[in-house]
Amino acid sequence: MNKQPKEEKSKYITDENGTQFFVVGNTKIRVTEHFNSKGKHIKDLVENAVQYAANAA
């Protein structure tokens, strides 16, 4: 039987200092935006990158 890996849900957390993190499973990435205000939000870019990497594996 072909067993699919369990898809881990992503989430954003903010620590007591106001620092935001993107978390998937045991991976925690500090989020800092340096993008054009008219461009895509970092949240969308990070989610797309993580999902792309997970599907490529």
Image: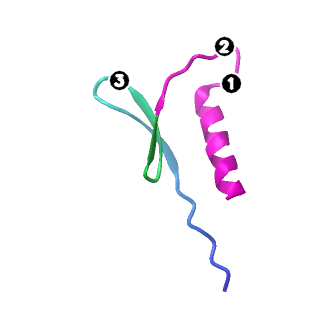
Q: Residue at x 35, y 23 (%)?
A: 18
Quarter of the image where the C terminus is located: bottom right
Name the residue nearer the viewer: 15 or 28. Answer: 28
Tag of residue 36: 2
Q: Residues within 10 Å of mark 1 (few under 14, many from 20)?
A: few
- Whichever of callouts 1 and 3 sits on the residue coming sooner in the sequence is 3
Asked whether residue 9 is drawn in magenta, I would say no
For disc 1, the marked residue is 40
Q: Marks 1 and 3, Cα distance to the nearest angstrom?
A: 22 Å
In this rendering, is residue 1 above or below 24? below
Dot 1: what SS?
loop
Residue receiving disc 3: 18
- The kind of secondary structure element at disc 2 is loop
Q: Residue 46: horizontal and vertical position, in percent?
A: 60, 36
Precedes in sequence: disc 3 or disc 2: 3
Residue numbers of the magenta segment: 30-57
Q: Which amino acid is tagged 2?
A: Asn
Residue 50, located in which quarter of the rendered image?
top right
Q: From what the image shows, is residue 27 above or below residue 1?
A: above
**Which residue is at 67% across, 41% downward?**
48
What colouring style does the render use? rainbow
Does 45 sit left or right of 23 as displayed? Answer: right
Quadrant in the picture for residue 34: top right
Q: Quadrant of the N terminus?
A: bottom right
47 vs 29, left or right, is: right
